[in-house]
Image (cartoon, grey):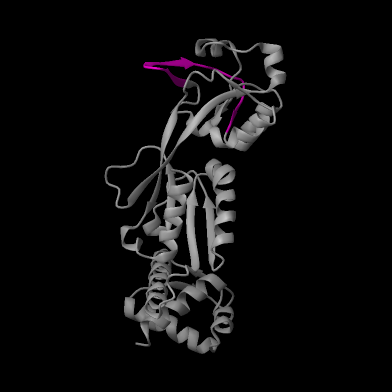
Amino acid sequence: MLDKITGMRVFVSVVKKGSFAAAAQALTLSPQMVARHIAALEQHLATRLLNRTTRKQSITPTGQDYFYRCVAILDALDEAERAARGTALLPSGTLRLNAPVTFGRYALASFLTAFLQRYTQLRVELTLTDALIDPLEHGIDAVIRIGELAPSLRLVAKPLSPYRLIACASPRYLEKQGTPQHPDELQQHNCLGFTPWLHDNAFHWPFTHGDDRGGVQVSGSLTINDWGAMLEAALCGGGVLLGYELALSEPLRRGELVRLLPEYAFPQKAMHLLYDPRRAGETRLRVLIDELCARFP
């Protein structure tokens, strides 16, 4: 068959560009040569990677999986070539990172902005989702996850700062409803519920006070599936919010929210950076791991 590595690069370009013609232009090849490379790959693999008609093309499920693996292989190959040339000390290329929505929006975006100002030859593709993503299957370099890890995890897990939650409310709400002095008093307050936590601690808020552990069953008239909207509801006086400490730092500093029951510790969740151990030697991934662990120790 034709050169396999070139074929993989052609296939990745076709998927990213959306057509043979666009990939041919990007790779300075003829559309006929692009078609030959794809046909040779499919023949070698004995499977169809792309469905093609006269009007459009679409990737098959097998092709989708092969695409992600090709991206990882080609990235590793480029990294190896840079190391052989002695240029790997300057991290370059693209990092694909996946993280939970709230953490990504309120903590990670500012970190990545400063990170890319230091490493000007790097690019980062950040996707935010609260669904569990397997980086080995989706071509992701690293994943940040909140919560306990599965025992069967195939990845390296670096611990990051715990995802700490605190209770707060707006001055407007507290003027009308009063300020609770003990967690049990939250039962008399309108507490905002976060829909993804309905089976966790949406309305059961554990707390600790020294060595004492307890929990309070709260209730409220509003549950929301987006934490940013929950924050806005709290700012408007809609109720008591249990939220991510870092995300609340600015509203608390400006006096738009007031922290409640500061002597009590509300839930905190473990947070980890996950990555494929086979990728640990790649320079660009290494600097991301080191800087994330330093920023969120």
Is the magenta region chiefly helix, strand or loop? strand
The answer to whether 71 appears left or right of 250 in the picture is left
Task: Point out the image quarter for the C terminus.
Answer: top left
Q: In which image quadrant can residue 24 be found?
A: bottom right
Q: In which image quadrant can residue 107 be found?
A: top right
Percent x, y for residue 102?
A: 55, 41
Q: What stretch is highlighted in magenta?
A: 205-224
Percent x, y for residue 246?
A: 55, 36
**Can the viewer see residue 55?**
yes
16 or 44: nearer the viewer: 16
Percent x, y for residue 47?
A: 35, 73
**Image point (49%, 48%), residue name:** 99
Q: Is residue 208 magenta?
A: yes
Q: Is residue 83 magenta?
A: no
The answer to whether 115 appears left or right of 50 in the picture is right
The answer to whether 278 appears left or right of 6 in the picture is left
Percent x, y for residue 62?
A: 39, 66
**Image point (53%, 20%), residue name:** 262
